[in-house]
Amino acid sequence: MKISEKKTVSKYTLYVGLNDKDTHEQRLIMDRVVSLVIWASNGYKSPITGQSGFGTYYSESGEQVNEKSIVITLVDVSEELAHEIAADLCAFLNQAEVMITRENVERYYLQETIEANNTPLV
């Protein structure tokens, strides 16, 4: 087993609702949104992990709103890039806002192989 050097880095999590801010309805299907995020990530030249989710928030009038959402995880990126990605998603998906959280995490990589008779199995 080989483990890389450990490094403390910033991890940003973006929570993006999928209800349109004007119509309050979901306009895009989840698979399409995930595909768009993956496609857009090529322009950022940064690893992006996206997950589908479900969220609840309370509107200014106090009404509970439920909506499907996408959760984007960014590890070892600058604050500026995290904000750029959040702003692009906010505008592209016509959101009122995107919630961002940041925490320090320890990042490292692990490598392992399985060999039978000195021949890789895969």
Image (cartoon, rainbow, N blue to C red):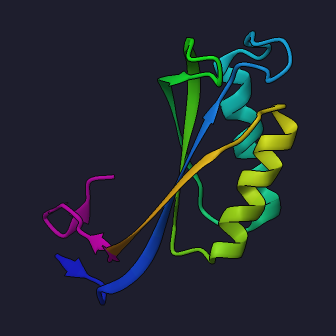
Q: Position of residue 22 (x, y in %)?
A: 86, 19
80 with respect to 59 (left or right)? right
* 24, above or below 59, in the image: above
Q: Please give the count of numbered marks on the rendered protein.
A: 0
Q: Which residue is drawn at 71% across and 53% down?
A: 86
Of residues 96 and 13, the one nearer the viewer is: 96
Task: Provide the residue span drawn in magenta.
Answer: 106-122
Position in image of residue 7 (x %, y %) = 35, 86
Up the image or down, 25 lies above or below 57; here it is above
Q: Is residue 82 left or right of residue 103?
A: right
Question: What's the residue at 82%, 50% (across, down)?
Answer: 88
Q: Which of 80 and 75 is in front in this view?
A: 80
Describe residue 76's horizontal placement relative to residue 22 as left or right.
left
User: Residue 29 appears in which quarter of the rendering?
Assistant: top right
Residue sitting at x 57%, y 19%: 68
- For the view shown, which residue lies furthest in the left direction? 117
Q: Where is residue 40 in the image (x, y as percent from the top left)?
A: 79, 49
- Residue 97 sits in quarter: top right
Is 99 on the left or on the right of 8, as rendered? right
| Percent position of residue 100, x then y | 56, 54
Is residue 64 found inside the magenta-colored segment of the image?
no
Residue depicted at x 71% and y 63%: 83
Residue 9 appears in view: yes
When the figure is inspected, residue 23 is found, relative to residue 58, above or below; the finding is above
Q: In which quarter of the image is the N terminus?
A: bottom left
Q: In which quarter of the image is residue 109?
A: bottom left
Can the viewer see residue 41? Answer: no
Is 109 part of what is drawn in magenta? yes
